[in-house]
Amino acid sequence: MPADKVQNRWLVVVGALLIQISLGAIYIYSVFKPALAGKFPSWSPTDLALPSQLVLAFFALSMVFFGRIQDKFGPRIIASLGGVLLGAGLIVASFAPNLAVFVLGFSVIGGIGIGAAYVCPIATCVKWFPDKRGLITGLAVAGFGAGGLVFTPIAKSLVASVGVMQTFLYLGIIFLVAVLLGAQLMNNPPAGFKPEGWTPPAPAAGAAAPAKADYAWTEMLKTIQFWLLWLTYFAACTAGLMVIMNVVNVWQSVSFLDLKKAGEAIPKETVLSVLGKGATAVIIVAVFNAVGRIAWGKISDSLGRKPTLILMFVLSGVTMLGLYWMKSYALFVAGASMVGLCFGGFLALYPAVTADFFGTKNVGANYGFMFSAYGAGGLFGPWLAPKLMELVEKVPYFDPAKGKEMPYPAGNYMKAFVISGALCLVAAVLIVLLKPPTAKEPAAK
């Protein structure tokens, strides 16, 4: 059925980007931390970190549920619900008198809203673009990666002008409206839809026939292919989120150890320079993260999903193994950016791989389960780095925020990087060995 007689399928991409840019702004939580510390001085550093950890967990877990009902009720309804929940969550957080209420709003309600809305553009775009599956899933998730770049300056300006709690109120309203608008462009193509002029590729000569066209999530979970893909996705997210969530801390450790002088505190001007370079590194990594989602998706459409994944895992693994020795700023940023580039690609490719292996009919539910690997990696990777950090020295430095000399616990992150790098290389081997389900190895019943 020609696409132009149904709907311009690129309108779905416009809606997807509008939704995902709004959802991706959740990654700018670090912008709010200094202001929240001033607003709630009783919150410990662990308390300040808790909302960002829990929002990722609720985001990933809720996708399992909403992926299933999205397939049943359609993407427009569920994406709209996600926008309402995200907006409501931030509005609740804006009135929070304590940590519990803030977590309820920002992390629980907001995180569930993100999970509901996030799965809809991906599942819908996969169905509309069977001919450009990698590129389109890349575009769909690129918006999520770009959300931080779009809303960071907006959030900083709002915090400075109206205060941090009022900022959550305004952002909640903005996200609610934006996601609702994007959701109205979310609808599935008619049954049997094929883009005009596109013919599905014929199976390779001698290839085994697929076991079936579309798997229900219950059938998918019984295949060894799902669990191997889940483990590789977990390895990818562990590496990517370990670096993204710890870029500033690792850079400060490397820098302060290099700058320390016996009996002298690192002066304020030098500290500000180090902090400025750390903030710049975060932005650069975010850019590569967003670019990787589109670039690797496009590459996979030409090179093939499997060879592309193998290449990405090898690049991530080798980079992680050598990251701690990349001590100059240029090398450090290059290494962190390579991991960010590949991490963005993993987020683009795994929705496409899920559809390749298990069909598009139930891709919302199926990718919801696959995406739980992101939640697990998001908890494990950022935790592993500080957990395995070996304290080298408490370097004295002048803390600009506190206006006095403080000790900085500079450490060695090598163990965490080596473990993560090894996991990526093991994942590369698993991808080499992995084959789609076929009629000779059907899903268990």
Image (cartoon, grey):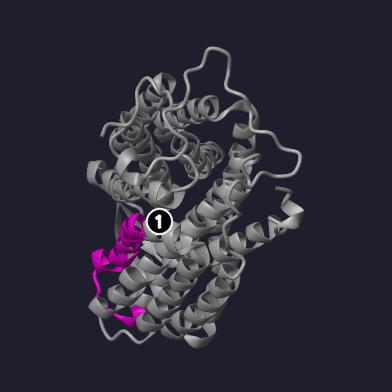
Majority secondary structure of magenta residues: helix
- In this rendering, would 60 be left or right of 198? left
Name the quadrant containing residue 407: bottom left
Q: Residue at x 46, y 57 (%)?
A: 119
Q: Is residue 278 above or below residue 215?
A: below
Name the quadrant containing residue 58: bottom left
- In this rendering, would 1 be left or right of 348? right
> Of the residues shown, which amino acid type is indicated by label 1?
Gly
Element class at badge 1: helix
* Magenta span contains residue 200: no
Number of labelled discs?
A: 1
Q: Is residue 19 above or below residue 43?
A: above
Q: Nearer the viewer, residue 168 or 41?
A: 168
Q: Split into 4 quadrants, where in the image is the C terminus? A: top left
* Magenta span contains residue 58: yes
Is residue 256 visible in this depiction of the protein?
no
Q: Residue at x 49, y 65 (%)?
A: 23
Crowding at mark 1 (Cα within 10 Å: few <14, some 14-19, many 20+): many
Is residue 342 visible in this depiction of the protein?
yes
- In this rendering, would 58 be left or right of 251? left
What is the span of residues highlighted in magenta in the rendered image?
A: 38-65
- In this rendering, would 37 be left or right of 19? left
Residue that numbered label 1 is attached to? 67
Q: Nearer the viewer, residue 185 or 3?
A: 3
In the displayed orientation, state which residue is furthest to the top. 206
Q: Position of residue 63 (x, y in %)?
A: 37, 57
Q: Position of residue 237 (x, y in %)?
A: 39, 43
Q: Nearer the viewer, residue 338 or 360?
A: 360
Name the quadrant containing residue 393: top left
Q: Position of residue 19 (x, y in %)?
A: 55, 65
Q: Position of residue 295 (x, y in %)?
A: 63, 40
